[in-house]
Image (spheres, rainbow, N blue to C red):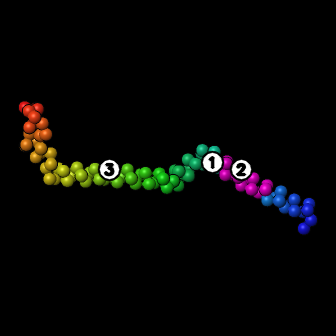
């Protein structure tokens, strides 16, 4: 290959790289397309992990509240007079 042909080939490759970069930038700034992708279920992994963690916290709180109600943890503290009974509070 001659030097001018090499330069033309290199210019064509750079032009293709620039087109791809420009397409990526346009996709990042196209809010309508991003909203449409989000509406159709395309989610970020970090968002899914945060949602799963929040769901786990809610389930854990419900289970612990149910166990406390089942075992009567609140009622025993009331029968004993609560934590301030020995200091004379609330009576």
Q: Distance between the residues labelled 1 and 2?
A: 10 Å
Q: How far apart are marks 3 and 1 (CA)?
A: 34 Å
SS for callout 3: helix
Residue 76 location in percent, x, y? Answer: 10, 46
Q: In this figure, which residue is indicated by the disc labeled 2?
A: 22
Q: In this figure, which residue is indicated by the disc labeled 1?
A: 28
Q: Give the range drawn in magenta.
A: 14-26
Closer to the camera in the image, 89 or 20: 89
Residue 50 location in percent, x, y? Answer: 43, 51
Quadrant containing the C terminus in the rendered view? top left
Closer to the camera in the image, 1 or 47: 1
Residue at horizontal 32%, vertical 50%? 58
Counting the numbered discs, the total is: 3
SS for callout 1: helix
Residue at horizontal 7%, vertical 43%? 79
Report the residue that reaches farthest toward the bottom. Answer: 1
Taking 26 as reference, is 69 left or right?
Answer: left
Residue at horizontal 11%, vertical 32%? 89
N-terminal label among 1 and 2: 2
Q: How far apart are marks 3 and 2 (CA)?
A: 43 Å
Residue 61 location in percent, x, y? Answer: 28, 50
Quadrant containing the N terminus in the rendered view? bottom right
Res 58 label: 3
Taking 76 as reference, is 11 left or right?
Answer: right
SS for callout 2: helix
């Amino acid at each position: 290959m001659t030097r001018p042909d090499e330069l033309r080939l290199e210019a064509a490759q750079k032009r293709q790289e620039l087109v791809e970069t420009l397409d990526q930038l346009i996709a990042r700034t196209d809010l309508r397309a991003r909203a449409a992708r989000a509406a159709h279920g395309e989610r970020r992994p970090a968002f899914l992990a945060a949602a799963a963690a929040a769901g786990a916290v809610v389930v854990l709180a419900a289970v612990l509240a149910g166990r406390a109600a089942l075992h009567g943890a609140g009622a025993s503290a009331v029968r004993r007079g609560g934590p301030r009974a020995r200091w004379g509070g609330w009576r």
